[in-house]
Image (cartoon, rainbow, N blue to C red):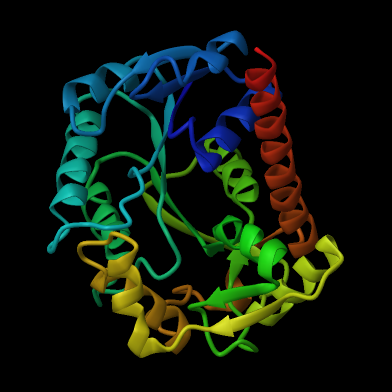
Amino acid sequence: MFAVMGVTGQVGGAVATRLLTQGAKVRTIARDPDKAAMWAERGCEVATADVNDANSLRQAFTGTEGAFVMLPPMFDPSPGFPEARRAIANLHRALSSTRIERVVALSTIGAQQERESLLYQLHLLEEELGTLPLPITFLRPAWFLENTSWDIAPARDSGVVKSFLQPLDRRFPMIATRDVGQAAAELLQEQWNGRRVVEIEGLSRVTPNEIARELASLMNRDVRMQVVPREAWEATFRSAGMKNPIPRIQMLDGFNEGWLEFESGASASRKTPTSLQEALGHLVARLESHETNRLENKGRVSEE
C-alpha cells in the first residue's frame, strides 16, 4: 500500500489516480476527511492527518511500503519560512518513526539553490528529508502550466494577460501537473537506494507569447501578453493581500534571470508528454464548465 499526501490538490490527486489505475492499494492523506470522501468511494483507505501534527502523519504512514509527501502550498510565507520549517520537521519526525520502505517527495526546479526565494522552502525540504536513512527521491518539476488558470478569465474577457515572466519571448521550463503526478506514481513503485533527484519538464520550453497565441486559438479571439514592470510588483502583490511578497518576487527574478534552473540542465531533464495546447485546453474547458454549473445553479435558486 502507498500513502499519498495532497490528494485534494492536482498533483497528489494525479499520483493517487495513477496508482489506482495500476492496481495498487492507496491510502490517501488529507486534513479534511469530507474533501477526501471521493477517494473512499474509489476504493482508497482515507487517513486524516495534518502536516502540523507529526503524530497524525506517523499514523498515516504506518503500514505502508512507500509514501508520496509534499508541503502544503505556502505562497505568502512569514520571513524566514517558519511555517515550512515546522512542516518539514514534522514530516521528518513522522517518516523516521515508521518502517516505511521508500519516499518520493515533491520538490521543485532550482531546489539546489541556496539563494532565497519562494522555492527556498523546497531547498529546506531536501536538506532535512535527505538525512533520512531510507531511499528517498526528490522530484523536481518545472513551472506548472496550471499557473495559467488565473489568466484564462482575463484572456477571455479583455484579451490581455499580465505577465510577470519576462521577456515575453524567453523560453521557460513548464510542465502539466498531471504529468508530475504520474511521474511520482511511477517513481514510487521503483526500487532504489539512498537519495536521488529526478528533474522533469514538458517536451519543449514555452514563452509567454506562445501561451497568449494558444489561448487566442482556443478562445477564438485576440489575446496578448502585457509585461508587468518589475518596479510595480511589490505594490501589485500587496494590493492583492500579500503580507510578505519578497520571496515571490525573488522567485520570479530567478526564473527571469535564469538562475532558477535544473541542476542537471535542460538537456538532462526527463521530458513529459502533455503539450501546451492540451494543458491550456483543459484549463479553458474547466473554466467553461464551472461557469455553466454556476449559471445553472443560479437559475435553480431563482426558480425556487
Across and down, in percent, residue 302 comes to 65, 21
Front residue of 159 and 300: 300
Q: Residue at x 18, y 27 (%)?
A: 53
Q: Quadrant of the C terminus?
A: top right
Front residue of 285 and 271: 285
Q: Residue at x 20, y 62 (%)?
A: 243
Front residue of 125 and 240: 240
Q: Residue at x 71, y 62 (%)?
A: 156
Residue 68 to residue 302: above or below:
below
Across and down, in percent, residue 297 comes to 66, 24
Q: How many marks?
A: 0
Across and down, in percent, residue 131 comes to 22, 49
Q: Residue at x 35, y 79 (%)?
A: 233
Across and down, in percent, residue 240 comes to 34, 62
Front residue of 223 and 18: 223
Q: Is residue 129 something that shows in the picture?
A: yes
Q: Residue 129 vs residue 276: left or right?
A: left
Q: Residue 128 vs residue 20: left or right?
A: left
Q: Is residue 189 something that shows in the picture?
A: no
Q: Quadrant of residue 303?
A: top right
Going by the picture, which residue comes out furthest to the front? 303
